[in-house]
Amino acid sequence: MRAQFGRKLKVYLDTAYERGTSDFYEQNVRPALLSSSYLLVVATPAAIRRSDEVASWIAREISDFTAGPNGQNVIAVRGAGEFNDPLPGDLATRFPNIEIVDLRGASRFWYLYPARIARLTSEKLKLVAPLLDVPFEEMPKLRQEEERRQQSLMGSITGAVLAVLVAVSGLSIFALQSRNQAIRSLQDSMFATGSMVILSTGLTSSGGSANERIRRILVNQGCDLIDNLSSGSGVEPAIDELVTCRLERALGRDQLGEQAEARALYDDAIAKASARYARVPRPDAAERLLQARQAYAEYFVRQKDNDAAEAQYKKLHEEAQAFAAANQTRSEYARAEGEALGSLGDLYVARGDRIYAGTSYDQAAVAVHRKIGLAGTDATLDDIEWMARLYRLAGEQHRLSGDFDGALVRYNQALEARSLVAADHSAPAVDQEAAITNALIFSVEQTRNDPAAAQKASAAALAAIGRVLGDQTAVASLKQKAMALQNWIEMQQKDH
């Protein structure tokens, strides 16, 4: 196609909007119009709302071109606004049956949405074909070329997964031959597609923006397929992929700056999970509701809307408490409580409310301790370090408020977390947290003028730092922090 229609288009773009004299129009715009094969009129609300002078200019351009040798070659392009909004000038009167090329949504990041790619590509070909004089019989070939070009962007990884999607779709269509077999196959297809969506969300973007784009395309296409499979079939998608798809789409809308659409998707994810749990009170629906609620709260944190974030974290805490009361054996609910209360503590610190912050960190630490107890042998070192950090943060609020006794109580609770780690296990992050906490105790005891207690705390801090520095599993960044803390303690000891 490039060999046959590869000529480069010469385009005159009228963006000057000169207002001086008619000489500019007669000497520049009008000759360009009369020598052009086509006139493209981009219809936007701004083009309609312009001043009378500019509006007359647009109408004049349309009038002069239509009076020229190629007057019937006018193409209307909808660039923004509603599709049926008025057209500039008297286009609607001159060409009552004019076809409008819809290029709305062709923003910088439109390629992140597969559905948008398909629509805009189709509309773009409507525009390109007449400009390059592509005959009607060549249009299928042109579309095939464009489809191949789009597919090449996705690479071999995308192609492999798309093959899975095609296979799933093929199985679903084949299963429609009999009612019972169709239902079973449809359920299997939705499960396979849903699994692919869940797995795709876990793909890393370490390869850069290209890998992240591929990941998002895979997730969105999988979600689109799930929507198509469930539409009119009477078969509901599993709540996992139902919520995951909405959260992924909400994140994409957020990145595109479409905040109203993002909030609507977060609200829908919460509503879908809540309705599913109300109908079938299973743990998967409860966990997805908590996931959606936390994602919505994190969205408001990114938007720097702390009041809305606080409201969502409070709802997350209430829902997690209610689920825990109904099923006291699941550690996921305790984790959600810890996340909500810890994040509330951060918000209270940001607004300077130390009392509420300290209380929230205390309650969060208790929730995480309960999670560790419920997990049993499956409890992770991250959970233990998390609990210690929360107690330490609670102690900090008391220390900064002048309540040294309250601070020491929390600091000692933070240190007790180390006892949850088996003696023969390496735990550099927990040791680092113990070192920080002991350093804070050292600072408090110095302030209270208790040199013996201060010396004991500094020795404990240095011992914990020694364990971090001698641990082969500790990452370099953690060791650097340990060294910096060690230097600080040694300087404090010299000063006193």
Image (tube, helix red, strand yellow):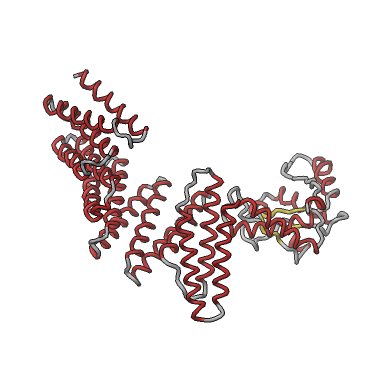
Q: Quadrant of residue 401?
A: top left
Q: Is residue 439 above or below residue 9?
A: above
Residue 77 at x, y = what percent? 70, 56
Please state if 192 lies on the left or on the right of 314 as rendered: right
* Residue drawn at 32 percent across, 56 percent down: 316
Q: Residue at 21% across / 18% down in the picture? A: 495
Q: Is residue 231 left or right of residue 296?
A: right
Query: Looking at the image, is 472 positioned above or below residue 279?
Result: above
In the image, farthest residue toward the right: 69
Image coordinates of residue 193 in percent, x first then y, are 50, 64
Residue 154 or 489: which is nearer the viewer? 154
Q: Residue at x 52, y 71 (%)?
A: 231
Pick the quarter of the image with the N terminus: bottom right
User: Is residue 113 in view from this perspective?
Assistant: yes
Position of residue 109 relative to residue 290, above or below, is above
Closest to the observer, 150 or 311: 150
- The x, y position of residue 104, in whole percent, is 63, 56
Which of these two is toward me, 409 or 355? 409
Whole-percent x, y for residue 334 in the image: 26, 55
